[in-house]
Structure formats: C-alpha cells, structure tokens
Amino acid sequence: MHTLRMTTRIIAVFAVILIAGCGGGGGGGGSSPTAISGTAATGSPITGGASGSMNGVVTLKDSSNPAKMVTTATDSNGNYAFTQAQIQGFTPPFMLQINYKIGGIGYSLASAVTAADVTSGHATINITPLTDLVIANLGHQITSAIFANSDYSSLLTPIAISAGVSALDTELQPILLQQGVSGTVDLLHQAFTANGAGLDAVLDSLNVTIDPATGSEVLTNTTTGQSVSGTLTNPPTTPLSANSINNVSDLQAITTTFNSLGSLLASNPSATDPALLAYFDQTNFLNDGKKLSPFLQNITTNPQVAGGSITFQNFVLSPVPSWVSTVPNGDAAYKVTFTVLQNLAPNSRSSFIVYKNNQGNWIFSGNQKVAKANIMSTNASITGVLCAGLDIEINDKGGIGLTYAIVNGPQLPSGGLLYVSTGNGSPLQLAAGGPTTYAGTSTPLLQSSGIVTNSCSKAIAGQTFPLNDAQIAALSLPAQYTISLYIGSNPSTDTPVGSYTQTVEVLPLSSTVDSAAYFASNIALTPNPASLVPSGGTLNINWNDPTNPNLYINNLDLYACANVPTGTGSTTQCQNMNDNLAPGSTSATLTVPSFPSGSTLSGGGVQLTYLDALFRQYWTSP
C-alpha cells in the first residue's frame, strides 16, 4: 500500500517494525564473488540507495551467538546482493530482513537462507510479503520478532521451508496459474523482475495482513475482494479463487488514477476546478450522503486534506454491490476499497464505486451510501477502565431524515441491534432493546438504561456494542455485517432507504492483550468547560501520546450538553465539535459555540482517538 505504482502492488504486512542494528560490515565488497542475491519487492521494487524513494536496506543476520550482521541497500529495481567476503565466517541459516518506508511509514519483510543455499555458491533468495508469510507461519509469530530472537537454527531448515512454501502455493494456486506462474513455484528461490508480470503480478493480486497484536492473518485477492483467514499458529488452508477474468491491469490503472488525483490535490485546486471535476461522476456522485459539490468543498478547503497531505494506498477491487444503480450499463466497474493517508499516517479505510467511461477514463462516484454507515473494531479506556467492542457509526450527513437503523451480524443479538436518532443531529445511538422496542426519540438508550453497568462499557455504548473476550474469540475474520437505514416508525413494515454490507477485518483486542500502552494519557482541558457555557469560547486540550509507538493520532471529539431554559422549564441541548488531528499532535484548540442565555452545563466529554495500521481504533476519555 504505497505511492504511485507501489500502491497497487504492496502486500501490507502490518507488523511491529524493528530496525535492526548493523554489524559485521557494510554494503559493497569489491571484486569478491556474489554469494546471495535476489529481488525485494511487494509487486513494485523496494528501492534503496542514494536515489531510492523507499530507503530499502537489507540486513543479513546469522545464527551465531552473538549474531553477526551485514547490510546492503537495494538498487532502483529492488535488487540486492551480498558477496562471499561479506558473509565469511557467518553461521547459517541466515535471516534476511528488509526495512523500508512508504509515505514515511516503516515496514519490514523477511526471508531465509539455509545452509544448503550457502554451499550452493550463489543462491537466489527473494524478499517479498510471501516469503515473509512463509517464515511467520513457520515461527508462529511476526518475522521481526523471529529476527530479533536469533534462535532460528532449528526453524529455518530446507525441509521446513519447503513445506511452508508448498502450503502457501496450494493456497495461492488459482492465482498463480492465472498469472502464468507454476502452481508449485519456489517463492523464495524463483528469480523474477518487479515489472507487473508473472510472479510480480501475483503480488499485485494479493494483500496479506498480519496482526501483531493477535497473530491473525488475512489473505485477500485484491482483484475480487475475496478473503481467507487464520492465525500464525493455524494458517488458512482454503485456496483463494482467481477472478473469472485477469483484471490486474484494471487494478493498476485505477491505482494510477487515484495517485493522479492525489497529485492534483497537492496543487490546491478549487472545488470547481475542471481538472478536479473530471475525476468524478458529476451527476450521480454520492458519498456518505453528500453530493459532489459539498464533498469537494470539504476536501479542497480542509487544511488537513489539501496541499499534498492526502495520499492513497492498498487498493482492493470487488464487485459493485447490488444496491448500486448509478453505473452506466456496459462499463467496467468495481467497488474499490483503499487506504487514505493524511500527512503520511493512516487516516481511514474507504471505498468508492469506480467505473470506466466511454473515453477509457476511470471515474469516481463515491461510496453511493445515503448516509455514513461504518463499523470498526474498537478498544477504549474510560477513566483507566479498559473495554472493547464494535463501533458502529451511523450519521445522517446528507440530512435525509433517518429515524433508525438495524445492524445484523456475528456476535450480535439475533434480532439485530437498533440504533435510533435522538433528534439533535448527532450520530444515531444504540438502543437498550431490539428493533421491536422502537419508540421514536423516546426509545430507551443502552448507555442510560442500567443494563450495562461496567463503567467503560456503559460509556462506549453510545455508538459501540460492547464485546467480551468470549465474543471476540468467537468472531471469524473477515466478519460481515449489514447496516440497514430507515425513515419511518415501524420496523416490522418499513422498507430501508439503504442497506450496506460492512466488513470487519481485524478483531478488537481482548483483555489479555489490551493495556494502557494503547491509550493517550494526562488529558487536560483549560479553562474548565463549565466556564464556557453559555457564552462559548476557546478550549485548549493537551495530552500525552500512548506509549505504544505503532499508533497514529487520528481525531479529537468534544461534546457539551447544557440545560437550556424554556418557558415552562428546561430542555437539553448538545453541541458536538471535532478536529481531524495531524500526526504527532499532543495539543489542540477547539471553539465551543455559545448556548442560549441562562444555560448551564449538564454533561460533556472529550474523546481522543488513535489508530493502528490495521485501522483498529483506540480512544480515551478522561
């Protein structure tokens, strides 16, 4: 998931990145014969050296104690080499680890060199997401942890590696054969060029996700959206299906179009710039309920979006959902899911309907949802109490008058979850009962019902359905949920105005894994928010980052509710404010709007949200 051509081709292995120290010599080696060489690629070459945009550096580490290491940079084609002189006196087997950056984010991939490879005189060893997966499956942990351990002499044997490659070949065989590659290809040793064909096209067609926190792994065919899942201790065995047609070229062309859009946004175009409008379906565009004009107005005026801070990565094609009716007949079209990076940090996972018009251009028509309807795995810390769940955000951004929604899927109640509009413009809230309990804005809410008593679970129950460890363990990835939206008052007879399938590809952390390290701390608000009601004013917020270094600041939400006097008593009025934070932020300033005269603060809070590279969210509320 990266920039330009690399965006199509990356297989993102989201593991904790350990930058290895260097020893045993550096790159180069004079006229000494080459001992080990190969290609480091993710579909695109992992480039290094003075002109390499990815800073690709390969470290070879032997099995001795203390371990010997030597490093070399990749070239502009992703090729690397170690000479016989560089590894003189090294004890096989060796591990290879390449550390590199895409959009400022660090990644690593691994491969292995056996004793037999060393004695062969000149071994070809690839470093790709597939070689990384073979090693991770053998060691039952992410490869950076295996590399750091050094005790892999009994793990990286020719027999074990051959068995690991064979198992992965079986799983990938339909895709291998479609791209003209042998179904029994040696993924470690088969020489290839990162040119978009053959084995490189196989890399284009795959997305491998490894969760370092849980050990889960998900393999996705990026040309169909099909996924299979397992764990590093119990890898998936179901083969991925190949597409009925070889559409890797469409994936590559769509990626190029997204990257071209990103380059245009870097030039600060206006919302009415013809060059910008040319990327979009100007008649039928719809995204989370917003038409094209307000959508473009937002992205061209938001300082966190315009001016080159937004890039796109990690594309997956899947069929256009049956509820989409805006694609011209006969045009090639896909639902394209992609990662949005803001200032080089993961910001969101989004999707557009994309089709090719009569001129051969790929056109974006938004996600075609009448309102925002998303679901994410969530962990939260409320006054130090940790809990987990599925955050379900349903927001009537287009103002169509949503009254309620019903959510169905694994580990949810059999009748589904009921979300209701509270009539104040905020996202729909989780009801205490199922769909049959709907009573308009008088529907009891789970958060205030007394049904949930754990302080953290009660706090997150506004939008989030709490999950315990047993429920989390029972979820199989990818987990699919259906969010149906309604404008009406009778769930037994109403017809949804929109019904959308959402996929969860990462689990919330269980209590055995979760810890305070994932959450911001020492959140301070000045002045006291109560002093800003009713007149409004400026509120300063400061905090400390989580101690886990592999998280990215994402969003700050502030809400304030006040008792507002009326002629016969009072009513509650709430204001919601948010700030899409830049990476590295540890402070923010928000403007609290005024309330009617005589109002007094009745409730409120602040929520800081971080993301990991898998788009699991971690939010904190003091």
Image (cartoon, rainbow, N blue to C red):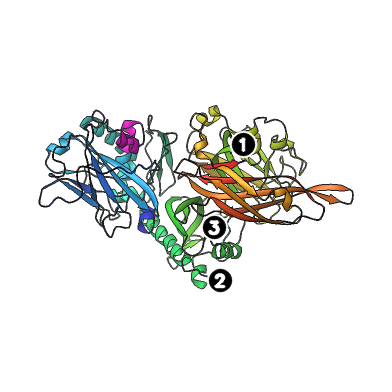
Marking on residue 53: none
The answer to whether residue 369 of the structure is visible from this angle is no
Return the x and y of residue 358 as percentages of the image width and height.
Answer: 45, 67
Which residue occupies the extreme front position in the image? 527
Q: Rounded to the nearest whole Å, what is the CA distance between mark 1 and mark 2?
A: 46 Å
Return the x and y of residue 102 as percentages of the image width and height.
Answer: 37, 53
The answer to whether residue 520 of the structure is visible from this angle is yes
Q: Residue 428 vs residue 504: left or right? A: right
Q: Residue 446 vs residue 547: left or right? A: right
Secondary structure at numbered mark 1: loop
Marking on residue 383: 1
Return the x and y of residue 32 as percentages of the image width and height.
Answer: 10, 48
Main SS, magenta residues: helix
User: Few, some or many C-alpha atoms within 10 Å of disc 1 (few <14, some 14-19, many ≥20)?
Assistant: few
Residue placed under numbered mark 2 in the picture: 272
Q: Contact (CB < 8 A) between labels 3 and 2? A: no
Q: Residue 102 vs residue 539: left or right? A: left
- Given this view, does label 3 or label 2 mark the residue nearer the observer? 2
Question: Sequence order check: which comes first, mark 1 or mark 2?
Answer: 2
Secondary structure at numbered mark 3: loop
348 or 350: which is nearer to us?
348
Q: Contact (CB < 8 A) between labels 1 and 2? A: no
Magenta range: 133-155
As shown in the figure, which amino acid type bears the numbered disc 3?
Answer: Gly
Q: Rounded to the nearest whole Å, what is the CA distance between mark 3 and mark 2?
A: 17 Å
Residue placed under numbered mark 3 in the picture: 366
515 or 180: which is nearer to us?
515
Residue in view at x 42 percent, y 58 percent: 254
- Given this view, does label 1 or label 3 mark the residue nearer the observer? 1
Q: Rounded to the nearest whole Å, what is the CA distance between mark 1 and mark 3?
A: 38 Å
